[in-house]
Image (cartoon, rainbow, N blue to C red):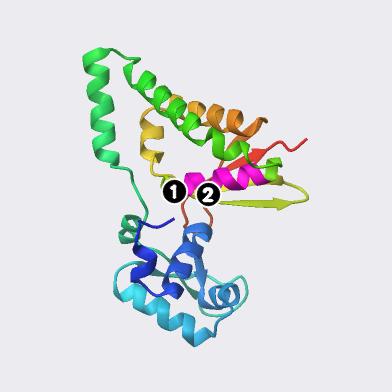
């Protein structure tokens, strides 16, 4: 999920590369080329352009076999600005000031009301979906409009889940952990099923992600 209008201003290949690196952390050119069904030189040209603009970093990863370290690309700190942050600094300042003015529970009460209102706003849209999988897909789309970057996926071992690679409120969750449970309860009520939330450490230098394991039984 990029800031509104970003997709229309840049090359679609750049968007795809940034999205894949956001999900996977870092990758060498051959892996990116395979995912995007492009030539090695074509991907290298786009990665170098993004690197020159400051959005990608080059890193050298030791090979498991004999040979020179492999060059991989990952997102640079400058790329954070491409993803919505929901006015994080201002939000945190306001929540802290509410705590000072109205007591320790004031920020949690405000966050509870936020998720309550969001649930009411999304309820009708989600209830139109017939199956749980369809509801979760609609929910992921609604969350993307709020600035999240998430995808629904399924495999035999892990089951059905929603993977989240960016959330504009992550900094708020760190400062007020109670909001994590509030959001989780909202998601459970919207889907009408139990959800397990897991934080998955990032691989190959990438950021952590959140998995919502959705009970489909």
In depth, the one of 27 and 50 nearer the eye is: 50
Magenta stretch: includes residue 142? yes
* Residue 92 x, y percent position in the rendering: 28, 32
**Residue at 43% of width from left, 28% of height from top?**
117
Classify mark 2: helix, strand or loop. helix
Residue under label 2, please give it: 141
Residue 18, quarter of picture: bottom left
Q: Mark 2–mark 1 contact, CB under 8 Å?
A: yes
Magenta stretch: includes residue 44? no
Residue under label 1, please give it: 145
* Residue 206 x, y percent position in the rendering: 47, 56
Q: Is residue 46 visible?
A: yes
How far apart are the two marked residues, 2 and 1, measured between alpha carbons?
A: 7 Å
In depth, the one of 183 and 40 nearer the eye is: 183
Q: Quadrant of the N terminus?
A: bottom left
Per the rendered image, the range of residues in magenta is 134-144
């Amino acid at each position: 999920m990029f800031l509104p209008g970003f997709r229309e201003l840049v090359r679609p290949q750049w968007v795809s590369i940034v999205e894949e690196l956001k999900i996977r952390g870092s990758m060498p050119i051959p892996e990116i080329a395979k995912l995007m069904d492009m030539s090695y030189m074509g991907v290298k040209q786009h990665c170098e352009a993004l690197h020159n603009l400051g959005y990608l970093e080059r890193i050298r990863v030791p090979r498991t076999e004999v040979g020179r370290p492999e060059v991989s690309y990952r997102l640079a700190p400058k790329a954070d600005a491409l993803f919505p942050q929901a006015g994080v600094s201002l939000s945190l300042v306001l929540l802290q000031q509410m705590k000072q003015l109205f007591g320790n529970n004031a920020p949690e009460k405000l966050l509870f009301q936020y998720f309550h209102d969001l649930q009411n706003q999304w309820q009708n849209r989600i209830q139109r979906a017939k199956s749980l999988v369809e509801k979760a897909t609609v929910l992921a789309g609604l969350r993307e409009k709020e600035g999240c970057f998430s995808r629904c996926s399924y495999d035999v071992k892990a089951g059905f889940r929603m993977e989240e690679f960016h959330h504009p409120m992550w900094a708020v969750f760190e400062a007020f952990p109670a909001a994590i449970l509030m959001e989780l309860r909202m998601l459970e009520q919207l889907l009408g099923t139990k959800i397990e939330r897991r934080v998955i450490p990032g691989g190959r230098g990438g950021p952590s992600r959140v998995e919502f394991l959705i009970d489909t039984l």
